[in-house]
Amino acid sequence: MSKNFNNPIGLVILLFVLTLSRISPTKAQDDLLQMLEAEQSKDPIYTIATFKATRLINGQTVETISRNHLNFWISHRFGAVNSGFIANFFGLDEAKIRLGLEYGLTDNWLVGAGRSSLEKTYDLYTKYKFLKQSNSIPVTVTGLAGWAINTMETCYGMESGAEMRFNENLERYSYWGQALIARKFNERLSLQLMPTFLHFNKVEDPSISNDLWALGFGGRYKLTKRFTLSGEYYHAFSDPISYESSTGKVYPYQDAISIGVDIETGGHVFQLHFTNSRGMIEKHFIGQTVGSWADGDIYYGFNISRTFSFDKAAKHKDK
């Protein structure tokens, strides 16, 4: 042993071996960790809760509900704020309401139905989530398809001031399709695009097209754990010039603009908002909004959502 320490070459060899014995396992461990992290990064990590509810304000979000869960919606719109204090108590003396149900067939597919007091309308719709935002997919994409029937009497006056007359029941139907494209940028901010197509089997004037394209934009910003600011805007690609030249009247419909705040309270989502649309389904708020923010035609309203679970397996697991 003493000879080895007296020999410089032997000492260098010994130090080299000792160094390798210490470094190699550490380097190998680091290499294994890097390989594991690289492999794990290939696994999808999905974004959750882009929005807290299936509706933003009037319109839908990319969210669906869990399988075997039921959403009960109460949507309420008071009269116009500019209707006066004495005559209408700033709109609180009148209201339009919609009651709706949504049921999750799977975690990505729901069906819904509702009844609105506006034009005594019944609606059916379905939503399916095709893509989920993840570490490899930048957005969530959900498809929406809906149908509605107007059950007013054969002849009645519309909110636009026009007279509608139905000659057969098929004329009462309207349809819509929508692509909902959203991205959650961080824990606070989520934005969404809503290209939309509507078809009305009958419109009040021949100068108004039965087909209507629209583009919506909306989003939410989370202020605290329970309070969120939200807003949405829908631009309808209508042809007001054709209507005005044909009828000599001002085109009656406006783009829908809504702002509000969401309050989360356990199983409830409580949404308070101001909007220029009294309609609460796509055919009404995208295609037939008559209120104007510039003229003070602003309606105060709210949505209340309550979720019920019918998943026996999940209940048993919770117990």
Image: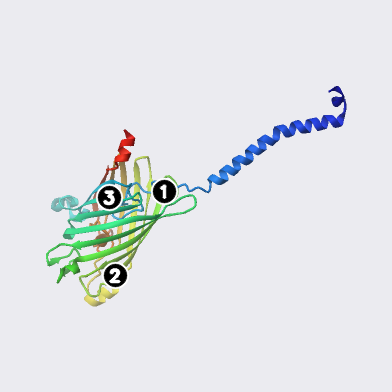
Classify 18 as above or below 31.
Answer: above
What residue would you read off at disc 3?
103
Residue 170, how many percent across, how many down?
19, 68
Can residue 242 be seen in this snapshot? yes
Q: Quadrant of the C terminus?
A: top left
Determine the secondary structure under disc 2.
strand
Determine the secondary structure under disc 1.
strand
What residue would you read off at disc 1?
189
Of circles 3 and 2, the one toward us is: 3
Closer to us: 251 or 17: 17
Can you name the residue that lies furthest to the top here? 2
* Residue sitting at x 32%, y 48%: 65
Closer to us: 206 or 259: 206
Crowd rating for badge 2 (residues with CA inside 10 Å; few <14, some 14–19, many 20+): some
Q: Quadrant of residue 15?
A: top right
Residue 102 placement, left or right of 221: left
Residue 192 placement, left or right of 240: right
* Residue sitting at x 27%, y 50%: 103
Residue 134 placement, left or right of 110: right
Determine the secondary structure under disc 3.
strand
What residue would you read off at disc 2?
211
Of circles 2 and 1, the one toward us is: 2
Task: Compute the Cα span from label 1 to label 3.
Answer: 27 Å
Classify 300 as above or below 11.
Answer: below
